[in-house]
């Protein structure tokens, strides 16, 4: 996707809308046509978030699927930094206050870095009955116009923490972006709870878990250099009393930074596996043992449909019980590795899922 940059360009885009052809944003030529009356969905992403092959890219996929399903126009903006994202938002709010047409517009902001601005300005949209706002992911509803939702990752990560005992041998390295982002912290808590609630398969040589934060910055850890990933991976290999551990299983809850770890691990002579995070990565059959899914693409399709028919809820929390998250095992892993045989005889996936749903519900009082 071509990034749209610059405050003035953003102003023109938000005013006129656009159409989209494949991966190219096409701007209307002045004088050739009037702005379309088709409903428009505009997304303003996390700074430099698109291209992570993870959470943000799944949102992009879901919005485009919704466009095909419902026949809406889309405009997906990828700011290079927070300041540019805030400029897009201010342009949006300023223009909405002056629109006098009846075009339906939904603005979507999937980044917590815009939280303060959204909460201070969302009431400016109330004068326009044809405009709405979807702010995600937050557990705190908006005071005023706009809907919010939160995808609870605790249950799916609890399942993953249990299941990793059946697929890893020496060390599990849980790599968390930072200790401040709520979704990351709860994912880490769920994984550790599932790991600790599962009895070791080999009591004399139990599987070890190391938890590492990649950044002390409240929004950091989602992008790292390959050299940093290589250093961290080598440190994990020497985690056990300075012993060189080849069998390291990575659980990277760190957005696009996960791919730096995959590249680093493949460049080092060692045996490693990983748990896929957010998307289905089981096609990487030699390395991905299973994937923990956050089906944000499906949620986006559902929400845009609810917006169009006027049923978008003020706030809701979605999770394992709703199908917004899950864990899947690739056919190759199940058929040809030890994990498949163990699950057949020891671990019932349906039963584990129900336990995880209960744990998730107890934690969040669902």
Image (cartoon, rainbow, N blue to C red):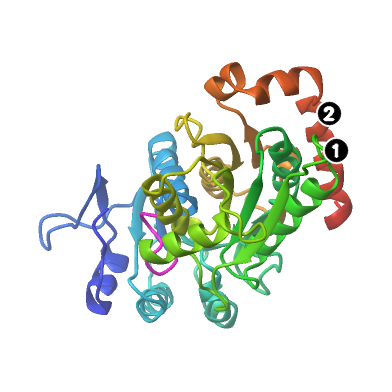
Which residue is painted at 57% across and 81% down in the image?
A: 116
Q: Residues within 10 Å of mark 2 (few under 14, many from 20)?
A: few
Q: Is residue 200 above or below residue 134?
A: above
Q: Regarding mark 2 in the picture, which secondary structure is present there?
A: helix
Nearest the eye: 310 or 214: 214
Horizontally, is 271 left or right of 76 in the view? right
Horizontally, is 325 left or right of 129 in the view? right
What range of the chain is rendered magenta? 46-52
Which residue is painted at 26% across and 48% down in the image?
A: 20
Nearest the eye: 228 or 291: 228
Q: Which residue is mark 1?
A: 355
The x, y position of residue 109, in whole percent, is 49, 64
Nearest the eye: 204 or 100: 204
The x, y position of residue 222, in whole percent, is 48, 64
Q: Which residue is mark 2?
A: 351
Q: Looking at the image, how many numbered discs can be counted on the residues? A: 2
Q: CA distance from mark 1 to mark 2?
A: 6 Å
Q: Regarding mark 1 in the picture, which secondary structure is present there?
A: helix
């Amino acid at each position: 996707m071509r990034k749209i940059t610059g405050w003035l360009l953003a102003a023109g885009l938000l005013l006129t809308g656009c159409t989209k052809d494949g991966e190219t944003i096409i701007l209307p030529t002045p004088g050739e046509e009037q702005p379309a009356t088709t409903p428009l969905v505009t997304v303003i992403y996390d700074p430099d978030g698109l291209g992570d092959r993870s959470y943000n890219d799944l949102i992009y996929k879901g919005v485009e699927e919704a466009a095909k399903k419902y026949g809406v126009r889309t405009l997906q903006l990828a700011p290079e930094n927070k300041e540019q994202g805030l400029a897009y938002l201010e342009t949006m709010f300023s223009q909405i206050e002056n629109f006098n047409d009846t075009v339906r517009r939904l603005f979507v902001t999937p980044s917590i870095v815009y939280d303060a601005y959204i909460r201070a300005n969302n009431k400016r949209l109330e004068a326009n009955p044809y405009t709405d706002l979807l702010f995600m992911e937050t557990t705190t509803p908006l005071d005023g116009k706009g809907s919010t939702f939160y995808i609870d990752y605790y249950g799916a990560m609890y399942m993953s923490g249990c299941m990793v005992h059946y697929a890893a041998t020496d060390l599990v390295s849980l790599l968390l972006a930072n200790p401040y982002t709520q979704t990351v912290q709860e994912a880490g808590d769920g994984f550790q709870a599932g790991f600790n609630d599962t009895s070791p398969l080999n009591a004399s040589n139990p599987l070890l878990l190391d938890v590492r934060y990649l950044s002390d910055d409240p929004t950091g850890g989602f992008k790292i250099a390959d050299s940093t990933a290589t250093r961290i991976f080598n440190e994990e290999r020497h985690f056990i009393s300075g012993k060189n551990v080849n069998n390291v299983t990575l659980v990277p809850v760190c957005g696009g930074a996960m791919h730096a770890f995959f590249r680093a691990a493949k460049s080092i002579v060692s045996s490693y596996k990983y748990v896929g995070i957010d998307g289905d990565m089981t096609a990487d059959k030699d390395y991905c043992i299973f994937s923990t899914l956050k089906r944000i693409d499906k949620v986006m399709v559902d929400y845009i449909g609810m917006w169009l028919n006027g049923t978008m809820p003020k706030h809701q929390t979605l999770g394992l019980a709703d199908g917004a998250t899950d864990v899947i095992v690739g056919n190759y892993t199940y058929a040809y590795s030890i994990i498949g045989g163990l699950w057949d005889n020891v671990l019932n996936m349906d039963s584990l899922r129900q336990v995880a749903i209960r744990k998730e519900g107890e934690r969040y009082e669902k």
